[in-house]
Image (spheres, grey):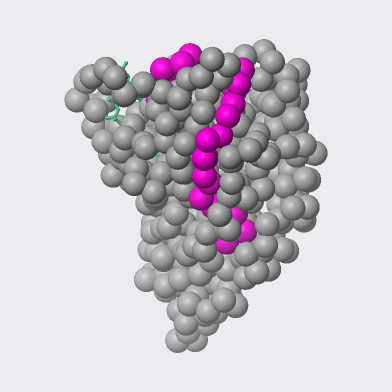
Amino acid sequence: MDFDFTEEQRLIQQTARDFAAREIAPKASELDKNGRWPVEIVKQMGELGFMGMAVPTEYGGAGMDTLSYALAMEEISAACASCGVIMSVNNSLFCDPILKFGTEAQKKEVLTACASGQKLGCFGLTEPMSGSDAQTMATNAEKTSDGWVINGAKNWITNGPHADFILLFAVTDRSGPKIKHTAFIIPKGTPGFTLNPRDHKLGIHAAHSCTVFFEGCKVPDSAVVGNVGEGFKVAMATLDGGRIGIASQALGIAKAALGTSLGYAKERKSFGVPIAQHQAIQFMLADMAVELDAARLLTWRAATMKDKKVRHSMESAEAKLFASEMATKVAHKAIQIHGGYGYSTEFPVERNYRDARITEIYEGTSEIQRIVIAASVLKG
Ligand code: CAA
């Protein structure tokens, strides 16, 4: 596997780094403290092509590859993990499945608007009573003569309060031995589609999520994405890509925590020398650097495989598992290096620590990633 980045990939990485330093980092603390949706940053990310990075230009995207997306996601997330996941949900969980499974009309009308950043998408799989065991969802879509009627609820819907469209998964057939699901695109404002106020969470305060409800919500046949009855595969294939986005978000959080720690360790003195000269601190910094690099390699491998259109379920799960647990460990050490200051809101490492934690949960918990990996390993 070759990680000599192309000229274009380097340019994207640098563009994302500069943009994040200039426009996002100075606002990250305020966004977190106020739980403010970063409306202006979402707009700027759209203008830069960051909301549909791997979507062809003919459908409003930037026409780049998944590795470029991973590189940009790391840079944006290093400045603000909330901005990172807003970008990731639109790219990986909304645009990618419509590109892969959508009809030409869906690509023209919905994908083009969302990949270009003019509109925003979200992904509705999780429900109050089914998270890890996603197949057992209660949401139903019943066939009528001219479309479908949907009833159910979905929760923890990142981007939900602001999204223009949801990619929704519902059961369409419970008659056989296997439940069958179907995916639908539903625009906000469709009668019967309502939202709860936003959730309050430990971290990623600026990335709003909410519960959404469908009560007798009628959609036409043209809302179906992919084949009727094959929605679960759409969801799973989508998450194979989404997990690369979350792994990249975790890389960004860890990169930020390590960077802040390096600066602090060189400035802060104890026992007459900068603490960076103490082996106790050096060992922590060394472990943080090694684990971050290892997670990067796993993430870039998964991204490269996705670009080669090779099945990458195991590689994405490995990247997401390792990178998310790494980010929590790195942010934990970052607080330790900062001592009391690390525990205060004066330094960003406490935010890194809170933001890192969700990467071990959404788009499949660490336990689900281990199930996916074990299934592949056992299959051989
Ligand atoms: N690609 C394509 N098809 C796949 C697939 C994949 N990666 N994984 C499974 N499938 C297919 C299987 O081949 C199988 O097909 P057949 O019925 O034809 O045999 C079918 O899907 C069912 O597969 P399994 O029997 O493996 O399914 P399962 O019920 O045992 O569940 C699971 C597997 C891995 C546990 C899955 O339920 C899962 O990933 N759970 C976690 C859900 C999750 O990640 N939720 C995140 C929500 S989104 C989010 O968090 C967004 C956000 O806020 C940012």
Q: Which residue is rendered at x = 74% and y = 53% of the image? A: 39
Residue 23: x and y, percent?
Answer: 76, 55
Split into quadrants, the picture shows ligand 1 in the one at top left
The single residue placed furthest to the front in the displayed view is 145
Q: Is residue 19 found left or right of 95 in the rendered image?
A: right
Residue 144 in view of the camera: yes
Q: Which residue is rendered at x = 57% and y = 58% of the image? A: 198
Residue 82 in view of the camera: no
Numbered disc total:
0
Q: Which residue is rendered at x = 62% and y = 50% of the image? A: 161
Residue 77: x and y, percent?
Answer: 59, 50
* 268 is within the stretch colored magenta: no
Where is the C terminus found, in terms of image quarters? top left
Please tell me in which quadrant of the rendered image residue 330 appears.
Answer: bottom left
Nearer the observer, 250 or 168? 168
Specify the segment rendered in magenta. 205-234
Residue 29: x and y, percent?
Answer: 65, 67
* 220 is within the stretch colored magenta: yes
Q: Which residue is rendered at x = 40% and y = 27% of the image? A: 171
